[in-house]
Image (cartoon, rainbow, N blue to C red):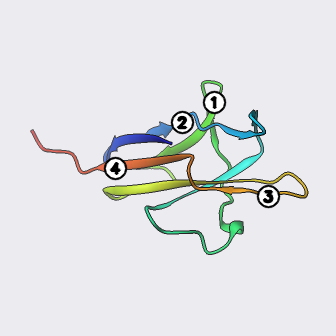
Amino acid sequence: MTTWRINRLSREWVGPITVTKDGTPVTGWTLAVLPLYQTPATADVIDEDPTPLDGGLGVLVGPGTGHVLDPGEYTIWVRYVDNPEAPVLSDVGRIVVERGTPR
């Protein structure tokens, strides 16, 4: 699992996040960013499309985004639907938002 560390004042793209099926990267997955140890109420809430950048997929976090995160740790949840399967993964990444220190 990859861990990204960002300052709470930064707006950053977290990625690339790679989801695989039988070892082959896939697209068409959705994600949710939740506080560490919080689980989604249902798989349906893992419904945000990833943000493409530099040929990869990830999520934009920080001020001015859909993910303004307070200092703390967050888990990236992913859901990939491939009929009849729809696996939910919670081990694709972690985001640590640091408070930052004044200089």
Q: Are marks 3 and 1 in contact (CB under 8 Å)?
A: no
What residue is pinned by disc 1?
A: 56
Mark 2 or 3, closer to the camera: 3
x and y, in percent, of residue 97 in the image: 34, 50
x and y, in percent, of residue 57 in the image: 63, 36
Q: CA distance from mark 2 to mark 4?
A: 15 Å
Left or right side of 29 for 94: left
Residue 41's place in the image compared with 97, above or below, is below
Residue 48's place in the image compared with 19, above or below, is below
Q: Secondary structure at mark 1?
A: strand
What residue is pinned by disc 2?
A: 15
Q: Secondary structure at mark 3?
A: loop
What residue is pinned by disc 3?
A: 86
Which residue in the rendered view is the most extreme toward the left?
Answer: 103
Residue at position x 61%, y 75% in the image: 41
Q: CA distance from mark 3 to mark 1?
A: 22 Å
Q: Are marks 2 and 1 in contact (CB under 8 Å)?
A: yes
x and y, in percent, of residue 78 in the image: 64, 53
- Mark with earlier residue (2, 4): 2
x and y, in percent, of residue 75 in the image: 49, 55
Viewer-nearest residue: 80 or 28 = 80
Residue at position x 36%, y 41% in the image: 5
Viewer-nearest residue: 50 or 77 = 77
Which residue in the rendered view is the most extreme toward the front?
Answer: 22
